[in-house]
Amino acid sequence: MYVAGYMNSWNGEPLMQEENSEFWSRQYSFPSSGSYILYKFQHGSDGWESINNRSASVSIDTTLAWVYFDNQPPTDAELVYTNVTLTVIDEDNGFQDIRFKGLFSNWATVQGYDDGTNGDETANDGVWTAVIDSVVGPSSYEWGAIDTDNGDGTTCEACDGSDGYGTWLLDIIGESNQVFTVEDDGSVTGSTSFTIPYQGDPITKTVIFSVDMTEWLDEEGATGMPVFSVARGDQMQVRGGFNGWNCADPANCEMTRTPGTNIFSLATSITGFPSTENEFKYYMELDSSSIEVLNSTYGDIYDGIGWEDSPQFGGGNRNFILGAEDGSGLLELELSGYYDLPVTGTIPSGQTVDITFTINMTDADADGFNLAEDSVYLSIKDRWLKYLQGLGDDYTAIASANGDGTYSVTTSFTGPFPWHMLYTWGFYDVSAAAHVEEGGGFGFGRFRARYQHADANNDCAWGDYILPEDSWQLDPPLPIEDFDPGTICITLDIDKNIFPDQFYLNDNYPNPFNPITSISFGLSSSAEVKINIYNILGQRIVEFNKGRLEAGSYNYLWNGENKIGENVTSGIYFYEMKAGDKFREIKKMTLVK
């Protein structure tokens, strides 16, 4: 048995069994100032309770009351025991070692057989079998199966994370955990078998991962959130199913900075089926010296904060497929920011912005919400935002009723902080003495995601922002706003306090870029200024005419769109700056998606 919650960043930790009883427990320490925690129990590391999050407020030494898993007490029904035969049918995919796991085994692996023994009827027919003895009923059991191939050229034996987890076969066919039920009379209903159709021959490709860290750098000239420092020994990593979600082998997880850029990349060989979805996340591995700096500046850093929560995926894992063999042996993934944060997507340091969130709770009565007595709250899920703002890892804000079934909460944030908001809504059910919160899990849409937008009519200034109204939705995937970094307002920043002694055009930054880059230039005297952008064919796709500008230094942001607002494709582009008849220069830049 395991427990997961705010106190361990929702990473399940084992409970201790009370002698030989059915009771399990674990002890945690919390600040004496008091803490509000959410948590759930797990039957095995994957078998989550199906109820809403449990909650507790602790300010003194406390022993919480015993509870039943899933709040289901023992019944008076007579226990029955039955043998359950589980099968996985492999339609010529060539799996070599299939093992079963589920609630019946506390999610430990049980060996499967395709050799005509141990309950398997026919050897080498692709039907893998495991007979689970004396399964207790009446009860229901989730289950699935793995192949011991880790997908990185290694296989697991323990398959508990110490040597990998193998390949979760249900992911290949896009299905959730299977469920069977042992009925009162000992009969078995539900799913005891699943089939994996032929997926095509496994292929191997070199996959290139790239992440832009511009808005996270703690180094000279950076204007984002000062967190990540190469000089202090921090590393960017890719962690996913292909490497067991760890960095045991640095060659297939550690990313390298491209010289002259803020882009970190990894090229690694991955073997799998062409259409199987591969999940991953970018991970920030902070050196102890960085942790010391952050601790002294912002307070104790949260455990596991290096894992990103991508707004594009509603906080869930990123994914890709290898695709059909095309002869190149190469797959280059789209360049993304850590947390999807694009260049210039950070509210400037020192600026305070009020963000207003609103939810319509009209349909929440189906989930137990009582307008007359229950309270509604907002739960911020971006852990870096909470940490840098000093909010606490379990931060929630009580919403105010607007009198029409909607509730609102306004929260102030001080820059630097990102343009995105990751959050969920919840309510405290007075009658059930329980917190009910949207979303959850680890998949797509476990959180809501929305974005602030600068004021195009006020020189692209960031200001107080009212997010669109949400509607209550208990189960994931929760709605997320379309991710479009091209909507970041384009402005021409002016520093009239700097007077160049000559005309100049700097290299764009960053380069390569996706999709925003900065083009800076200087004027030693007033001039009519034009900036043109051309594609590789020499066709002008952008014409920016600012008119007469006074002497000074300027910065123009291009968002990767042509003059009719269409996103341009990856490739090489040329930008030209003309200052009347006094100056003209052309430079090259590369857009990478």
Image (cartoon, helix red, strand yellow):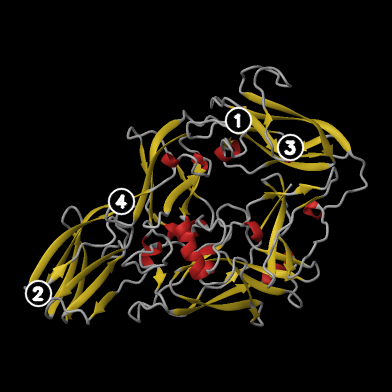
Residue occupying image coordinates x 42% and y 67%: 225
Q: Considering only order in the chain, which callout, 4 or 1, is on the residue closer to the N terminus?
A: 1
| Tag in front: 3 or 2 | 3
Label 1: which secondary element: loop
- From the viewer's perspective, is residue 313 above or below residue 165? below
Which residue bears the numbered disc 2? 580
- In the rendered image, which residue does mark 3 sit on? 105
User: In front: mark 4 or mark 2?
Assistant: 4
Above or below, comparing residue 73 to residue 324 in the picture = below
State the image quarter where residue 203 is shown. Answer: top left
201 on left or right of 365: left
Q: Is residue 171 left or right of residue 367?
A: left
In the picture of the structure, the residue carrying the numbered disc 1 is: 157
Q: Is residue 231 visible?
A: yes
Residue at 57% in and 72% down: 391
Task: Give amino acid for label 4.
Answer: Thr
